[in-house]
Image: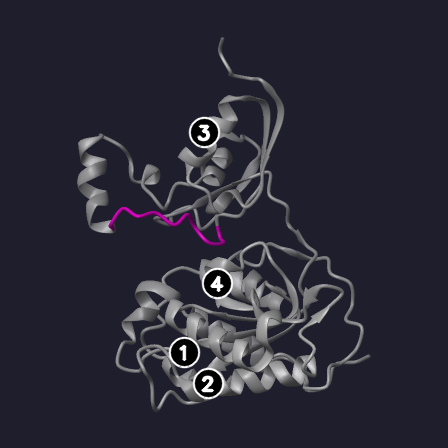
C-alpha cells in the first residue's frame, strides 16, 4: 500500500537550512505542506566540495540553481509559489524569488533591525517590534574595538576576554532568566566557538552549556543580548570575502539573534578592510555608529 498522502499536514520550520532531500520523503507522505524559512539566513550544510559542483551539474545536465547549498527546501518551495516578490535588480545576475514573504519584523529592536534590513532585505522589511523598555547598565549596542595583534589562528584571546567581561556585565553572573539565556556569545569560527565555551565553562560551570558557539548553531534561537565575537586571523583576510562576508546570510543570522542589544567584539580595521568586498561588515559598523548614546526610557 502506498504511503503517499497519509499525513494531513506537514510543517517545516527553518526550511532555508534544510536540503531538499531531507524534506522530500515527508512532503510525499503529506496532503498539504507549510514550508517556512528564509533563504537569506544560513544555507544547508552539505558535504560535497564546491570543486565538484560544476562537473556534477554538467554530468546531470542541471542548472546552477539546483546545486547544493544553493538549493534548499525553502528555495524550491518559493519557486513553486506564484505569489511573492523578487529581491535584486531586474538586470542583476542573481535575483531571489521569495514566496509569500512575511515583511513585518517583530523580533529585534534597532539597530539589529536596520542592519538586517540593509545588508539582506534591500530595506523592504517593516519594523513591527514594540518600543524598548529602557536602557541597560552597559549602554546601547555598539562595536567594541579590540585589535587582533596576537592571534592563534582565528582565536584572539584579548577579544575573548573582553567578551567575557561583557557577559559578566550583562548578566551579573546569573546567566539565565526564566530558564532562558540572557545573552548568547556567537562567532563565525568553530575554533573560536570551542575555546569561548571552555572559558565560559571554567567561569560558570554546567549552566553555561548552550550559551556559545558558531552562528550555524543558533539559527532559530534568540536572546535579549548577543555578543558577536568575531576573532579572525590578521594574516588571512580572505576569510572575509570567501566566507564570513561572501553573502549577508551569516551576519544576518548573527545580529538578529539579539532582541535588545548587540555587541560586536573584533578588530574593526581587519573586518572593514579591503576584503569586505560586499561592505557587509562596513554597513554593520556604520549602523552601530549611528546608535544614540542615550536610549530613552
Whole-percent x, y for residue 6 in the image: 58, 17
| Residue named by callout 3 | 24
Q: Which mark is residue 159?
A: 2
SS of the residue under disc 3: helix
Q: Residues within 10 Å of mark 4 (few under 14, many from 20)?
A: many
Alpha carbons under labels 3 and 1: distance apart: 38 Å
Q: Which mark is residue 215?
A: 4
Confirm or deny contact between disc 2 and disc 3 (CB under 8 A). no
Q: Earlier in the sequence, mark 3 or mark 1?
A: 3
Q: Earlier in the sequence, mark 4 or mark 1?
A: 4
Whole-percent x, y for residue 75 in the image: 46, 39
| Residue named by callout 1 | 231
Confirm or deny contact between disc 4 and disc 2 (CB under 8 A). no
On the rendered image, what quadrant is the C terminus found in?
bottom right
SS of the residue under disc 4: helix
Alpha carbons under labels 4 and 3: distance apart: 26 Å
Amino acid at each position: 500500500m502506498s504511503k503517499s498522502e497519509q499525513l494531513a499536514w506537514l510543517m517545516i520550520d527553518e526550511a532555508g537550512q534544510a536540503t531538499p532531500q531531507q524534506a522530500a520523503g515527508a512532503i510525499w507522505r503529506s496532503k498539504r505542506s507549510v514550508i517556512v524559512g528564509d533563504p537569506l539566513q544560513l544555507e544547508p550544510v552539505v558535504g560535497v566540495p564546491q570543486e565538484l559542483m560544476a562537473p556534477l551539474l554538467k554530468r546531470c545536465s542541471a542548472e546552477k540553481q539546483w546545486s547544493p547549498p544553493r538549493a534548499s527546501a525553502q528555495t524550491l518551495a518559493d519557486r513553486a509559489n506564484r505569489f511573492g516578490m523578487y529581491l535584486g535588480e531586474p538586470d542583476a545576475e542573481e535575483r531571489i524569488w521569495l514566496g509569500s514573504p512575511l515583511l513585518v519584523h517583530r523580533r529585534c529592536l534597532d539597530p539589529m533591525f536596520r542592519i538586517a534590513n540593509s545588508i539582506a532585505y534591500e530595506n523592504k522589511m517593516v519594523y513591527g517590534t514594540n518600543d524598548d523598555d529602557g536602557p541597560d547598565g552597559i549602554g546601547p549596542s555598539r562595536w567594541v574595538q579590540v585589535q587582533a595583534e596576537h592571534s592563534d589562528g582565528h582565536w584572539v584571546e584579548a577579544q575573548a576576554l573582553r567578551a567575557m567581561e561583557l557577559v559578566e556585565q550583562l548578566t551579573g553572573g546569573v546567566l539565565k532568566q526564566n530558564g532562558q539565556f540572557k545573552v548568547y556569545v556567537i562567532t563565525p569560527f568553530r575554533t573560536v566557538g570551542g575555546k569561548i565555551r571552555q572559558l565560559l565553562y571554567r567561569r560558570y560551570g554546567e549552566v553555561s552549556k548552550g550559551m556559545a558557539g558558531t552562528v550555524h548553531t543558533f539559527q532559530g534561537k534568540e536572546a535579549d543580548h548577543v555578543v558577536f565575537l568575531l576573532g579572525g586571523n590578521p594574516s588571512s583576510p580572505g576569510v572575509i570575502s570567501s566566507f564570513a562576508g561572501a553573502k549577508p546570510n551569516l551576519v544576518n543570522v548573527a545580529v538578529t539573534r539579539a532582541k535588545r542589544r548587540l555587541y560586536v567584539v573584533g578588530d574593526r580595521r581587519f573586518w572593514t578592510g579591503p576584503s569586505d568586498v560586499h561592505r557587509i561588515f562596513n554597513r554593520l559598523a556604520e549602523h552601530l555608529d549611528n546608535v544614540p548614546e542615550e536610549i530613552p526610557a
